[in-house]
Amino acid sequence: MPGEWQQNDRYVTDDEIAYRRVRMIPEHYQPVDPVSGLPQILNAALRYEDDGMSVYLDQFMEYESVSVDQLFSDETHAISRFEVHHARQHGAGILPSTDHADPNEARGRSHGLVRTAAPPPDKDRWKVLRNELRKRMSIRSSADTWSPVV
């Protein structure tokens, strides 16, 4: 049925890694949390947009020969990552979804979405999921260095 909300694709395996680009601006990312000393990903960096939260899926990145370096930019974006099963154990689904607006076509075909059971705004479920994902994320804000986040 057209327009039906699809939450999940079973062909995206639980052991897959999802990558999220994080803009390196104060509203999205703090390099050092004053209490923990760890990098901090803020709520604005993990927004639930009209179609879900954008991610890149390692299975499709490998197929398209897209490296993590192609997601990362020293100047503009850090990269966070989490395992798909962490999203699913908190009620989310993950599905591939080509980003046709991406100027890098291979990277666009590596794109996916994290979704709750209902289309946005699904604020209550998204808030819980976002906070659980953040606990399990690591971030790369410089070449080849991954850190836990708060």
Image: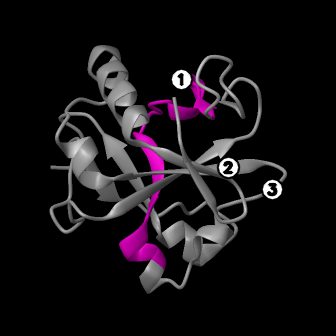
Q: Quadrant of residue 39?
A: top right
Amino acid on which the number 3 mark rests in the picture: Asp
Q: Which residue is mark 1?
A: 43
Specify few, some or many for label 2: CA neighbours under 10 Å numbering under 14, 14-19, or 20 or more. many
Looking at the picture, tell me which residue is in the foreground, 106 or 83.
83
Say if the magenta span includes residue 79.
no
Amino acid on which the number 1 mark rests in the picture: Asn
* Colour pattern: one colour
Q: CA distance from mark 1 to mark 2?
A: 15 Å
Q: Earlier in the sequence, mark 3 or mark 1?
A: 1
Q: Is residue 57 left or right of residue 22?
A: left
Q: CA distance from mark 2 to mark 3?
A: 7 Å
- Contact check, label 1 and label 2, Cβ < 8 Å: no
Amino acid on which the number 2 mark rests in the picture: Ala
Query: Callout 2: helix, strand or loop?
Result: strand
- Mark 3, mark 1: which one is toward the viewer? 3
Say if the magenta span includes residue 49.
yes
